[in-house]
């Protein structure tokens, strides 16, 4: 009889060192799917809790190099196994959320204007 494999085995996400996030459309789609605009400030978060610290650093570098946007890696808490979980935050400080919004605004407005509330 086959043994059931927990769903978590299939839901692991990883990034590779060759990741090149340069397309504003890809950034917009990712944010609209996994991002959340904070209501208390001009900033947002992207749900990246399944990625390692090193993968967050890779994403942080991609944002800086390709879009001149500084993102903050935030401690999101502990996972069931006790390891630290992280997420990405794009803060208003330094105009980073405005830069981010400027990169994806026209795409969101043209393609899915009903999602403009996230910006």
Image: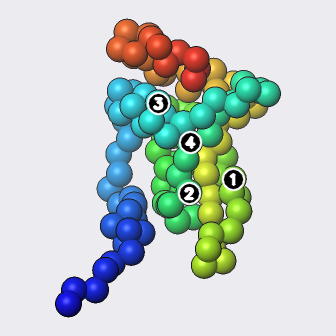
x and y percentages locating residue 45 in the rendered image: 62, 39
What x and y, as percent, mark residue 5?
A: 33, 78
Is label 2 in contact with label 1 (beta carbons under 8 Å)?
Answer: no
- Alpha-carbon distance for marks 1 and 4? 10 Å
Q: Are marks 2 and 4 in contact (CB under 8 Å)?
A: no
CB under 8 Å between callouts 3 and 4?
A: no
> Which residue is nearer to you in this view: 96 or 84?
84
Q: Which residue is mark 4?
A: 46
Dot 1 or dot 4, earlier in sequence: 4
Near mark 3 (Cα within 10 A), the count class, few <14, some 14-19 or many ≥20, is some
- Report which residue position mark 3 lands on: 32
Secondary structure at numbered mark 2: loop
Q: Label 1 belongs to which residue?
A: 74
Give how far apart the Cα atoms at labels 3 and 1 are: 20 Å
Residue most extreme to the bottom: 1
Answer whether labels 3 and 1 touch (C-beta < 8 Å): no
**Sequence-earlier tag: 2 or 3:** 3
**How dense is the environment of label 1, judged by Cα within 10 Å: few (below 14), some, or many (20 and up)?**
some
Query: Which of the image's four quarters has the C terminus?
Result: top right
Q: Looking at this view, is 11 or 71 the one in front?
A: 11
**Mark 2 to mark 4 CA distance (whole Å):** 9 Å
The residue indicated by pointer 2 is: 49
> Compared with residue 62, is residue 33 higher up or lower down, i.e. above or below?
above
């Amino acid at each position: 009889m086959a043994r059931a494999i927990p769903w978590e085995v299939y839901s692991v996400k990883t990034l590779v060192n060759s990741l090149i996030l340069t397309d504003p459309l890809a950034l917009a789609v990712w944010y609209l799917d996994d991002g959340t605009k904070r209501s208390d400030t001009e900033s947002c978060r992207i749900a990246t809790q399944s990625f390692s610290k090193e993968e967050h650093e890779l994403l942080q570098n991609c944002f800086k190099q390709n879009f001149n946007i500084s993102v903050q890696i935030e401690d999101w808490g502990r996972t069931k196994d006790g390891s630290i979980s992280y997420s990405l935050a794009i803060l208003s400080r330094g105009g980073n959320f405005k830069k981010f919004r400027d990169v994806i605004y026209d795409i969101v407005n043209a393609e899915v204007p009903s999602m403009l509330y996230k910006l």
